[in-house]
């Protein structure tokens, strides 16, 4: 009896297993496949590559050309400076005295030049003397002619007057020589003045080596790494940042995005390529930009790897505030189809050599042949077969 029961149980389990298998197979064959619906939209299909970088401002790191004690700092943070303005100075009393002495000598030479020029006092005095001598010679010659006419060439009056004419001629020649001498002295004074000017310029140059001078107009003092009384060096060791100057100036109106490219990316990057820029500080914003410059000279890192600097100009910052060294990512667009109908690549099927999509219209589904164009591997351009707003099926 027990044996019959056991056989019955085995048979029962067998048929239950068959029934369960048949049930699962039926469910599998009748189960609706999972899918998502995507609308055909109009937009840009782009091939691009991404590179990380940061915002960079035009700036100047300025240091003293000599070492010494800081004597004066003439600016404060936020000041707008003018070209040639002395921003800070070292204690250079000796150099200042040399410059003042050279300036005094140069000014004295200018006085000499003015005095000896044709409009100067010395030349005018000699010119008046020369003109007077000429007038006197004319008078003596006229008187001599009268004596010759009245009394004869060999008369005592004519002979005596002839001596006076000779003396007047000598006076004219002497006055002319004196005037010429002033002209020669003017030439010498001019050479001396040129020499003194060079000496003064050199003294000023030496003095400027103890000053920090603004290189251009309308730039802002962004940082000062030191105080009056500090010892300043040529490389400004007072700053924790070895690349920072004693005074940092920045142009708030000129900034860009800067990144380093690998050689393969640098080779496919060209000037004026469009860029989509995002910054970590503004994760929900995209900024239009374009490639402004690609270096052909690499920068070598500590591991000996080469990379190439790319400068990207931001085109539409609007009212957005950018800070130096803001980090972000630049999507450099190497090829793009603009304002085209597009869908995801996953919606396109290849059936017997034809490109098709499954079109959803309400509760109905149908197959539609399409013609595709440019693709970036994620999105594909639709050239024909679909219209904007059509719904296509993407199987999961």
Image: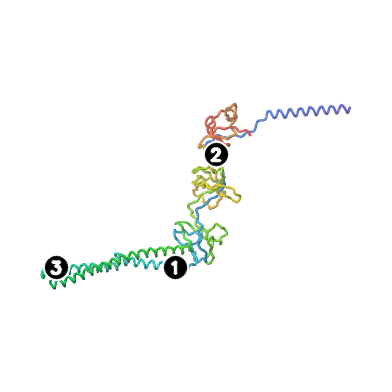
Residue at 82% x, 28% y: name it.
10
The label number, if any, that marks residue 145 in the structure image = 3
Residue 190 to residue 51: above or below: below
Q: Is 153 left, or right, of 31 in this rendering?
A: left
Q: Are marks 3 and 1 in contact (CB under 8 Å)?
A: no
Judge depth for marks 3 and 1 and give the one in front.
Answer: 3
Residue indicated by mark 1: 98
SS for dot 1: helix
Judge depth for marks 1 and 2 and give the one in front.
Answer: 1
Q: Are marks 1 and 2 in contact (CB under 8 Å)?
A: no
Query: Which residue extends farthest right?
Result: 1
Classed neighbour count for the residue bearing mark 1: other residues with Cα under 10 Å, few (<14), some (14–19), many (≥20): some
State the scheme by which the image is colored: rainbow
List x then y, in percent, for residue 93. 47, 69
Who is closer to the viewer here, 340 or 350? 350
List x then y, in percent, for residue 324. 53, 53
Q: Are marks 3 and 2 in contact (CB under 8 Å)?
A: no
Q: Is 276 left, or right, of 111 in this rendering?
A: right
Q: Is residue 98 visible?
A: yes
Distance CA(mark 1)–CA(mark 2): 66 Å
Q: Is 192 left, or right, of 10 in this rendering?
A: left
Q: Is residue 128 visible?
A: no
List x then y, in percent, for residue 396. 63, 34
In primary-sequence order, the first of circles 3 and 1 is 1
Residue indicated by mark 2: 47
SS for dot 2: strand
């Amino acid at each position: 009896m027990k044996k019959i029961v056991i056989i019955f149980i085995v048979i029962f389990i067998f048929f239950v297993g068959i029934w369960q298998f048949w049930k699962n197979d039926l469910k599998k064959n009748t189960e609706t496949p999972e899918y998502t619906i995507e609308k055909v939209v109009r937009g840009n299909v782009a091939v691009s590559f991404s590179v990380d970088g940061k915002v960079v401002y035009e700036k100047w790191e300025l240091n003293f050309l000599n070492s010494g004690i800081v004597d004066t700092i003439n600016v404060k943070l936020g000041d707008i400076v003018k070209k040639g303005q002395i921003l800070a100075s070292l204690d250079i009393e000796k150099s200042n005295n040399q410059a003042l002495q050279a300036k005094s000598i140069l000014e004295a030479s200018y006085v000499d030049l003015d005095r000896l020029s044709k409009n100067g006092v010395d030349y005018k005095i000699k010119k008046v003397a020369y003109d007077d001598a000429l007038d006197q010679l004319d008078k003596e010659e006229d008187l001599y002619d009268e004596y010759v006419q009245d009394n004869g060439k060999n008369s005592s009056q004519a002979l005596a007057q002839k001596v006076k004419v000779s003396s007047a001629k000598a006076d004219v020649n002497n006055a002319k020589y004196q005037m010429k001498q002033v002209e020669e002295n003017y030439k010498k004074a001019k050479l001396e003045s040129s020499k003194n000017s060079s000496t003064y310029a050199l003294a000023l140059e030496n003095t400027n080596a103890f000053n920090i001078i603004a290189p251009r107009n309308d730039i802002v003092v962004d940082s000062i790494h030191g105080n009056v009384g500090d010892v300043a060096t040529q490389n400004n060791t007072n700053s924790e940042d070895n690349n920072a100057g004693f005074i940092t100036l920045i142009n708030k109106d000129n900034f860009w995005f800067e990144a380093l490219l690998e050689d393969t990316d640098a080779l496919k990057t060209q000037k004026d390529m469009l860029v989509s820029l995002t910054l970590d500080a503004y994760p929900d914003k995209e900024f239009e930009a374009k490639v402004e410059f690609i270096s052909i000279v690499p920068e070598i890192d500590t591991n000996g790897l080469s990379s190439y600097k790319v400068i990207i100009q931001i085109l539409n910052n609007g009212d957005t505030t950018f800070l130096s060294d803001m980090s972000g990512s630049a999507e450099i667009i190497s090829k793009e189809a603009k304002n085209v109908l597009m869908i995801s690549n996953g919606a396109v099927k290849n059936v017997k050599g034809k490109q098709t999509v499954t079109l959803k219209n309400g509760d109905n589904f149908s197959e539609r042949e399409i013609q595709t164009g440019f693709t970036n591997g994620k999105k594909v351009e639709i050239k024909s077969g679909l219209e904007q707003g059509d719904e296509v099926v993407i199987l999961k």
